[in-house]
Amino acid sequence: MDWFSLPMVVTGLGIGTLVGLTGMGGGALMTPILVFLFGVDALTAISSDLVVSLFMKPVGAAVHLVRRTADLRLVGLLCIGSVPFAFLGAVATKLIPTDTVQPTLLVLVGCALLLAAAGLLARALVRVTRHRDALGEGPTDFARPGLRFAPAATIVLGAVAGLIVGITSVGAGSIIIVVLLLLYPRLRASQLVGTDLVQAVPLVGSAVVGHLLFGSVSLSIAGSVLVGAIPGVLLGSWLATRVPGGIIRRLLAVVLMASGLKLVGVPTPWVLAAALAALVGGNLLWIGVKARFGRRRATPQQVVPEDAVPRR
């Protein structure tokens, strides 16, 4: 492959824009695109996508570190599990027999995409039902005093996320955020995103080291995608304040579900039927959920300015 591929630059621009716009990881989108549209083998797509993520993640993480919207205690606990297991995930790809590595990795990526789609849906539902946010996105107004830490559960969560990323490159951000919402309901929305982004940097770095040793990194693919992805992230971040990200996330959940079903071997007609059912049924379900929960807001007594929340 040439060192510079214009179609991949354009693809990187689109993926980067969606990452900046929605906050979701690019692996869930980039890996299946490389496999389906560009005919890249699964292991090379996974390895190269992780290199791209390694350069994209620190941009968002730096912003949250400057704004102090990342809980470094949680970052540390997550990394205890995620960093070694991300490396082990890369090693695991080498242990798969050569004659079955391609179909096995495709199925694993498909399962990870289905998990990511479920995570996006669960995240939005938790936002609506627990925090009474009608759009399923955005910060909440409830007071956040202190956190009761669950070290063991947080470390296990990091280990599972690291293993998924190391094997499939599909970011476990949606899964991590949903579980963090359940474990630590007092975390502000900005802290959830910031904590996930900061812990993702060492996680992805560990996975990249593993794939450089045991994977199949293509610097031409990674370089071409990065040329478009970096300005795309900046563009998406700028658009994030002007476009309803919650709606886009729900559409992406359908795309991830359809891609996951295709990768695990579901026939195309059934994939199309499932996507159509998800679009129609999902919108009807969402209307019902918003009608039941979306209008119930916090009372003025419950609203506490963020500056008034004590820090530890």
Image: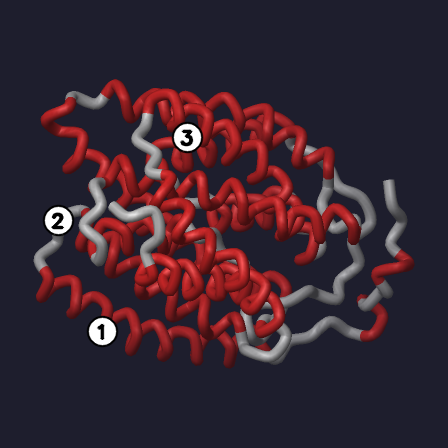
Residue 190 or 124: which is nearer the viewer?
A: 190
Give the spatial CA distance, label 3 vs label 1. 32 Å
**Image quadrant assignment for residue 239:** bottom right
- Element type at mark 1: helix
Quadrant in the picture for the C terminus: top right
- Residue 125 at least partly seen: no
Residue 303 in picture, x, y percent from top left: 81, 68
Q: Earlier in the sequence, mark 3 or mark 1?
A: 3
Residue named by callout 2: 265
Q: Amino acid under label 1?
A: Leu
Q: Nearer the viewer, mark 3 or mark 1?
A: 3
Q: Nearer the viewer, residue 234 or 254?
A: 234
Which structural element holds mark 3? helix
**Dot 2, crowdedness within 10 Å: few (<14), some or many (≥20)?**
few
Q: Which percent across, then down, holds residue 196?
A: 59, 45
Q: Quadrant of residue 199?
A: top right
Q: Are marks 3 and 1 in contact (CB under 8 Å)?
A: no
Residue labelled with disc 3: 163
261 left or right, relative to 17: left
Relative image position of residue 193 (x, y in whole percent): 62, 52
- Tell me which residue sits at (45%, 45%) in the image: 52
**On screen, 275 above or below 200?**
below
Q: Residue at x 83, y 74 (%)?
A: 300
Q: Residue at x 81, y 66 (%)?
A: 302
Q: Dot 3: within a 10 Å radius of its alpha carbon, few (fewer than 14), some, or many (20 or more) residues?
A: many
Say which amino acid is labelled 2. Answer: Gly
Q: Which residue is mark 1?
A: 276
Is residue 20 rendered to the left or right of residue 189?
Answer: left
